[in-house]
Amino acid sequence: MTASLKAIDASADLPVLMSDLATGARTAARALGLAPTAQKNEALDAMERAIRRNAAAILAANAEDVADARAGGATAAFLDRLTLTQARVEAMADGVKVVRQIDDPVGRVTERWQRPNGMTIERVRVPLGVVAVIFESRPNVCADAGVLCLKSGNAVILRGGSESFRSCRAIHECLVEGLREVRLPEAAITLVPTRDRAAVGLLLSGMNGGIDVIVPRGGRSLVARVEAEARVPVFAHLEGVNHVYVDGAADIAMAKAIVLNSKMRRPGVCGAAETLLVDRAGARDILKPLVETLIEAGCEVRGDSDVQGVDPRVRAAADSDWDTEYGDAIISARVVDGCGGAINHIQHHGSRHTDAIVTEDPETAARFLNEVDSAIVLHNASTQFADGGEFGFGAEIGIATGKFHARGPVGAEQLTSFKYRVHGDGQVRP
């Protein structure tokens, strides 16, 4: 940790600190929005090298964060989100490399047409400006958000959770090293250097026009607060109550693999399945193997009377279970009347994040994909593919479930807006 960061972290005048950060980010955004693609890519190359070179320091900082969280009684799912391993640090660096390789969205002409008066109109992508990312527990968000904003020409102010404070500082130093190496302003990627929770409220105020958009990444309470208090636009999902519907025409072996992976690969991520829906027409053959597979993998199953009937280890589901994002090795399960019943359940209890169908019937799959109004819908694939890296974006800032501007994984392209360029040769309006 640098001496300057220590000094700022000890500052007692938080409003002045945050105002200075926003002013610096605004100035950096101007420079970054005009930076050539080659310079941004060179910075990303330097960041990737710095993350790999400083992996030991990142892991050591993370170990301290994890130890504190464990001593504080954090759940296993929370610890999984917080923990970095050598493989996860390598994946972080790999994500930077992929972002470097994707096309630069800034300046891309997405549409061009000519008017009868001879004027040519172009729609061209431009950066949003200054993005504030407020996140909890997962320190890799620091790198993901930083490099995506850099690629898309945006300055970013990162406010990580207190539980990942040390980890984020170690990662941030690698990002700043990359900026410094290519002489881009260090304020292009700013980490709020304090655990003081009042910093969040100041960011939500918009900092007198210093922030253009806010992206929350965390639990229900954080996202709900951001959506309720933010004075600037928000890219957010309130929660990930995701479903896997296993149709009567599903392949049983495939269904078992997809359901198990959707729930248990990483139960604490936002793409994890929280509810299993099984077609009544195939329940006699499919339901019991699915429930046994989950329980034997260490997952608690809470089910309706049909699900309880196939295994005495199933707990009775309460009404609230159908609306719960567990973030843990728990799943609710019920039998529904075909694809229509599944769609109806998802409509009433889903969060419009990610939902999947397992079936060999193409017409049923097409109906599900067409009628389920979620940001991501999958056929015969795990819900855990709800991830910008898996979409080829290199990384993501989050999964947006709204319908304005961005929806689904928010990558570099989704962090741009557009403007119109009009070319004339002397036209005046009559």
Image (spheres, helix red, strand yellow):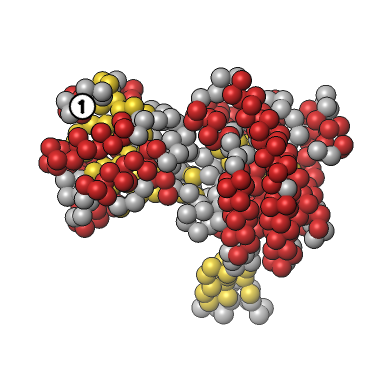
Q: Quadrant of the C terminus?
A: bottom right
Q: Give 80 or 172, whichever is nearer the viewer.
A: 80
Q: Answer yes or no: is residue 155 visible.
A: no
From this view, report whether residue 69 is shown above or below residue 249: above
Residue 250 lies left or right of residue 326; in this view the side is left
| Percent x, y of residue 303 | 25, 26
Q: Answer yes or no: is residue 389 visible.
A: yes
| Percent x, y of residue 390 | 47, 54
Residue 190 lies left or right of residue 75; in this view the side is right
Q: Give 167 or 145, whichever is nearer the viewer.
A: 167
Q: Give 148 or 423, whichever is nearer the viewer.
A: 148
Where residue 197 sits, quadrant-wise, is top right
**What residue lies at 24% left-to-right and 53% top-to-bottom?**
365
From this view, report whether residue 147 is shown above or below residue 327: below
Q: Give 380 or 314, whichever is nearer the viewer.
A: 314
**What residue lies at 21% left-to-right and 50% top-to-bottom?**
251
Residue position marked by numbered label 1 in the rendering: 311
**What residue lies at 51% left-to-right and 53% top-to-bottom?**
389
**What residue lies at 49% left-to-right and 44% top-to-bottom?**
400
| Percent x, y of residue 224 | 52, 29
Q: Amino acid at mark 1?
A: Asp
| Percent x, y of residue 53 | 73, 52
From this view, report whether residue 429 is shown above or below residue 150: below
Quick one: label 1, few (<14), some, or many (20+) residues within 10 Å?
Answer: some
Q: Quadrant of the N terminus?
A: top right
Label 1 sits on a secondary structure element that is loop
Q: Total of numbered circles in the picture?
A: 1
Residue 19 lies left or right of residue 113; in this view the side is right
Residue 404 lies left or right of residue 44; in this view the side is left
Where residue 3 sits, quadrant-wise, is top right
